Amino acid sequence: MVASEGAPLRSYGRAMDGIRRMVEDVEGVAAVYARRLDTGEEVVVGDVDEAFPTGSAAKVLVLLAYAMATGCGSLSAGQRVALTASYQADRKGSGVLRFLDPGLAPTLADCATLMMIVSDNVATDVVLDALGGADSVNGVVRSLGCHDAELASDTVWVMPPGQFGMASPRGLAQAWALLAEPTPLADVCKAMTWRHQHREGFARRVPFRPDLPDFGLASPLRLWSKAGSYPSVSCEAGLFETDGATWVAAVMGRDLADLRAGSTGAGPTLRAEVSRALFDAWGRAAR
């Protein structure tokens, strides 16, 4: 599906051509799926129905299950969980809780927030344990209409070839589309993803600043997203919103020759460039 006429159509065509070139230039396997929710336009580059490793990007599935559980009362957001030294030591990778003194007792809401803002692995496992593990989360996600995104492990820290999560770009984008509706579930999830601190991808080259509301200002682009990466894998998906358009996007790569995770790496750069191309096509054209 394409834009209807004039400048939006030209912008859409340029975005498609540019994104195809970006994906073709990647040394590895990559795919991009995006859908403008108000018009139905799609960007489909690569095999968007193939399952890719997600890394921490699958934490949005845990968040969806958490929001459902706290919303229906089966979990209390204020429940505290005392962290032990062994629990912290067993969960490596991203986050801050593993480096703090044992005995800290954050609430489940604290952990869900840390899971999304700083991609904390200890916090994620606390929430995942409270929810009953991967199978329980996957059941909730499927009940919400997402059938191509799932957790593959009951713990975040699993070494390849094991995976924390697997999803197709289309399926992971659909998980974020759930947050576009004015629902209590969306309110909880959006509040916990607004300040995602890993901004070398989607947020790098678009006019998004999550701290502007602190100054009484509005960000021209609203962006809620979650990235995930480890050597050879780079992934990000999220929800974008301007005053005139709303869209979801997922950029996923595997077997990447460039193993860098910072802003100079091939994976984050692809995510940043795709995000900018979509904003130029849909965010600017709609204003």
Image (spheres, rainbow, N blue to C red):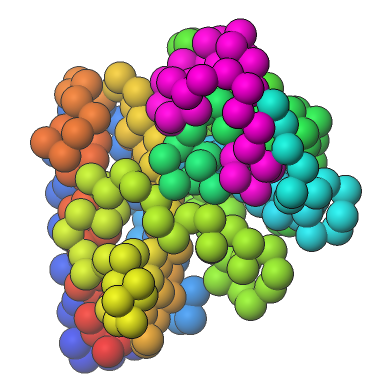
Residue beneath the point at 65% across and 48% down: 109
Q: Quadrant of residue 240?
A: bottom left
- The part of the image, by quadrant, that contains residue 138 is top right
Residue occupying image coordinates x 23% and y 40%: 268
* Image location of residue 115, percent across then percent down: 52, 40
Question: Residue 47: in sight, yes or no?
Answer: no
All told, the count of numbered labels is 0
Residue 134 lies in the magenta-colored region = no
Q: Residue at the spot x=67%, y=42% of the render?
A: 107
Any part of residue 66 in sight? yes
Identify which residue, 5 or 240, lies in the foreground. Answer: 240
Question: Horizontally, is 235 left or right of 178 in the view?
Answer: left
Asked if 122 appears above or below 242 in the picture, the reply is above
Residue 98 lies in magenta, yes or no? Answer: yes
Which quadrant: the C terminus?
bottom left
Q: Position of residue 263 (x, y in %)?
A: 16, 39
Q: Nearer the viewer, residue 142 or 132?
A: 132
Percent position (x, y) of residue 262?
19, 34
In the depicted structure, whether residue 247 falls above or below residue 5: above
Instruction: Say whether residue 228 is left or right of residue 166.
Output: left
Q: Which residues are magenta?
A: 83-111
> Which quarter of the rendered picture does the N terminus lie within?
bottom left
What residue is rendered at 44% in x and 47% in y? 117
In percent of width and height, residue 34 lies at 40, 60
